[in-house]
Amino acid sequence: MARIALLLLAVFLVECCHQAYAAIDAYPFPDDELRLRHNALIDELRCPQCLNTNLAGSDSMIAKDLRREVHRLLLEGKTNEEILDFMHQRYGDFILYKPRLQPGTLVLWFGPLFLLLVASVVLFRLVMSRKAEVTNLSAEDSRRLEELVGRK
Amino acid sequence: MTVNKSLLIPLAVFVMLVTVLAFGFRLDDPHYLPSELIAKPFPEFKLRDLHDPDRILTVDDIKGSVSLVNVWATWCPNCVLEHPELMRISREEDLPLYGVNYNDESPKAIGWLERYENPFQFNIVDNKGILAIDLGVYGAPETFVVDKHGVIQYRHVGPVSREIWNHEILPVIELLRNQAGEG
């Protein structure tokens, strides 16, 4: 029984992986460096038809075509930057998972930093105000406090 | 009655959240990508004519007058949906239509046009999706309004309906014609 369960699990896992990597094409590369760059680029580019899948993970026609284009451009000797530009010119900001630094994306880049700053200020003021409460004890109160915590 | 002000903070956060989400959900179709090609020249290409494979078409073939370039395929259900409107445009409007047969098989495409009729002056065979990538196409159908100098002036993603024609495409075409008339 346990064996059957294990077998089913194995089949299930194989099937999962098979689906996750359904979109592998056998593109020939002259060397491993180009292959690695190809894989990195198709990881970083977003499939224009899908809402949240990269080119590497999509089975759609356009993703297939764009993977082929990335392969072609790499063989032509284009740099990563040139390839990202090529895609950006045609498909816009949508295709880049790593948004470029430009007026429209300032909020994306600096929003979190801004929030961190605001949170720090709020936290700082909160902590400071608490400190103030404690130091504002009258002589009588601080004597009582010390008594209560058992220092005397 | 006095209210503890800190109790209002969750309410304020909630109101802010509702406001942000209300705007977020009112954004247009998330599948819609703004086009990068408006006001840019139609990309160069050298591709065969669907019905006359010996003829090589280039971007010069679509210049000369305001035209519609429609990207279509036999595998695309919305292309069937928009087809009657394209047929109407080809009959009633004084405007050439050019087809880009996208990632398709030519015999199938020819059969499709026989079955549904052919609204296009010619069809550019783009069976590898090369021109489509240069156009930033990510599905079919897509329709481009190209002016007489071969500059893309408008792009519509999805099927062209009578409403889209009246409210989105026709105004662009009229504007282009008026400009041409004045110039």
Image (cartoon, coloured by chain):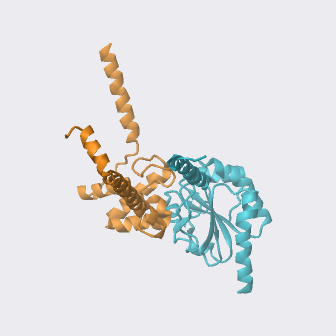
The residue positioned 58% from the left and 74% from the top of the image is: B39
- Residue B164 appears at what percent x and percent y? 72, 60
Q: Is residue B158 left or right of residue A113?
A: right
The residue positioned 39% from the left and 50% from the top of the image is: A56
- Residue B60 appears at what percent x and percent y? 58, 75
> Which image quadrant: the C terminus of chain A?
top left
The residue positioned 39% from the left and 40% from the top of the image is: A20
Quadrant in the rendering for residue B118: bottom right
Q: From this viewpoint, which residue is outermost toward the left? A: A152
Whether residue B108 is situated above or below residue B148 in the rendered picture: above
Quadrant in the rendering for residue A66: bottom left
Q: From this viewpoint, which residue is outermost toward the right? A: B92
Residue nearest the viewer, comparing B32 with A120: A120
Residue A31 seen in render: no
- Residue A60 appears at what percent x and percent y? 48, 48
Q: From this viewpoint, which residue is outermost toward the bottom? A: B183
Q: What chain is colored orange?
A: A
Whether residue A7 is situated above or below residue B57 in the rendered picture: above
> Which image quadrant: the N terminus of chain A?
top left
Q: Is residue B12 left or right of residue A111?
A: right
Residue A117 seen in render: yes
- Residue B182 appears at what percent x and percent y? 73, 86
Residue nearest the viewer, comparing B73 with B165: B165
Quadrant in the rendering for residue B168: bottom right
Q: Is residue B183 left or right of residue B53?
A: right
Q: Colour of chain B?
A: cyan
